[in-house]
Amino acid sequence: MNQLQLDGLSRATDNDELSDSMTARRGLSDRGARSLPVGANALPLATRSRPPVETALPVLADEYVCPGETHPISPSIHLARLSSFYSKCRECEHRHEGGSHSIPPVKAVGHPVGGTSVTVGRAGRTSLLETDGVRGIYLNELDRPRAAEWGAALSSMLWDDESRVGRGTRGQGDKETRRGGETEETEEPIIGITASFSSSPRPLVPLSPCPLVSPSPCLPFSPSHSQRRGPTVVIGFDERPASPDIVTGAAIGLRRMGCQVIDLGQTTAPCFQFAVRHLDAAAGMFVTGAGCDPAWTGFDVVGRGARPWSRGHQLEELEARARAGVMRPTRAAGSQRTFQALVPYEAGLWKHFHALRPLHVVCGSATKLFPRLIDRLFARLPCRVTHVALPVRRRDLRDEQDGDVRRVATAVVSGGQHLGLIVDDDGQRCAFVTERGQLISPGELARILIDFERHEHHSLKVVATERLAGELAPWLMNLDVEMATAEESSAAITTALVEHEARLGLLRDGRVWFGETPPACDAVVSLARVLQALSLSDASCGEVVSRMSRT
């Protein structure tokens, strides 16, 4: 053996010893490292036989495997996923193994059970349902594929409500002959999609430059225009950065199930509900994270006539179908068109602004659409408005010490304004402050609105939640006002409004439902009613509130 071979053998032996020592330090010497022959018959490293592919190492005791995955993750990744509320951590048996980095418990977000506040960790959430919608952390709990599952679940519920033809009454005429002489029953056709199963040739329709966008978005949709084969669903989204991604997933799920989607684009919740009523759609999905922190997203669902879905009113069934998965009712995919709902929606607001005295209002909002709408409405009014930009955050409009409430109250007092308005991200929840910066409570706001409606209508019926009704009962004893109670949800309030033919629906969170046809909840209409109530006299807002409290 020459000197060159001896040097190569020495270097190979040194490298092998270094590799064995490193493997031993990692704790793998007894499992992953193999003993090599040592002695006179030891061969150089280049001549030893090694397997072409290394086998997978077993999972160490301090490694974890997420549910549904096969590869292990390190403890650091385990802690990182726990701290970011990774969706699979909800079902993981190791979700409480946080060590010194354990996640502190927080109050559960959702409907309290039995009126008691439950303290749990967000990593243990098993449901995304809030009282009036679906909310979850973007990407961790709700992303585009999951939004598609929710959209498909909604479509499945709508298809179940569609009337079917020939079920249970099929005869020999409903059978189709095969080539071999056998007969096979055909699936009963669904109203509205019969044309898709017809064997007659369909006329060719020239496509617009973008086949998903209608060339005339402002035209009303009718069966002759859209050739709809499935339920019509209106979709829209708010101004949060995650909303376009979520609404895209919802549209994919709806169209895959054969629904005809009408896209409003970026809009507000009141405008969205107006479009559902205006287009006589079967349902609507509005993507929003209102009421939550900026990292959250979700959506609200309404049925025909923009009747909201809430916990206890169809939301549980929607979540169950989204988890279980649904089957496609038709092979034909649905279409998608746009509709400019802001123009007719804004035109319908003008009737609420009349007979107003010159008042200066400060409006605080976290959106860009609301200030633009108010500016256009106030351009022809004797009133003047000043806007205060608010951050996107979760706020409590009933707390006088809330940062946004104090910010608007300071602007009202420093500017010598007559009234202050704080609007939540959904464009429905709102709160008012007087000229002295004092927050008007939900009970005081209810008295102002009820007193104004009494001047407009001889007999008045209102609906309120139980806690608010108990607060208003002594004040209503000497007034000719009939009051009904309902649960603290949008679905319960709107149902009670229709059943009792009431004029007002009052909630303690700052939402006011007006008994129109159908009922509507809009912070712009609430502002118009308060301005009309203040215009009945020359008294200030604080004086009107004090007078209502004394009577």
Image: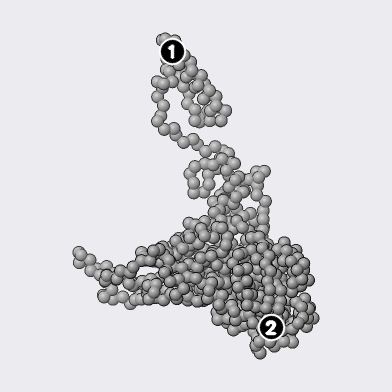
Q: Are discs 1 and 2 less than 8 Å apart at CB?
A: no
Q: Amino acid at mark 2?
A: Phe
Report how far apart the C-alphas of labels 1 and 2 lie in the structure. Answer: 105 Å
Q: Position of residue 48 (x, y in %)?
A: 41, 22
Identify the secondary structure beneath mark 1.
helix
The picture quadrant where one finds residue 208 is: bottom left
The residue drawn where x is 39% and y is 72% is 226
Say left or right for 457 vs 226.
Answer: right
Residue at the bottom extreme, as displayed: 458
Badge 2 crowding class, 10 Å Cα cut-off, few under 14, some 14 to 19, many 20 or more, is some
The residue drawn where x is 65% and y is 43% is 99
Q: Amino acid at mark 1?
A: Leu
The answer to whether one can see residue 112 in this image is no
Q: Position of residue 175 (x, y in %)?
A: 26, 71
- Quadrant in the picture for the C terminus: bottom right
Identify the secondary structure beneath mark 2.
helix
N-terminal of the pair, mark 1 or mark 2, is 1
Q: Position of residue 455 (x, y in %)?
A: 68, 87
Q: Nearer the viewer, residue 381 or 140?
A: 381
Number of disc labels: 2
The residue drawn where x is 60% and y is 73% is 376
The answer to whether one can see residue 178 in this image is yes
Q: Nearer the viewer, residue 496 or 263?
A: 263
Residue at the top extreme, as displayed: 2
The picture quadrant where one finds residue 498 is: bottom right
For disc 2, the marked residue is 452
1 or 2: mark nearer the eye: 2
Badge 1 crowding class, 10 Å Cα cut-off, few under 14, some 14 to 19, many 20 or more, is few
Residue 160 higher or lower than 499, as above or below: above
For disc 1, the marked residue is 4
Say left or right for 263 vs 123.
Answer: left
Residue 46 tag number: none
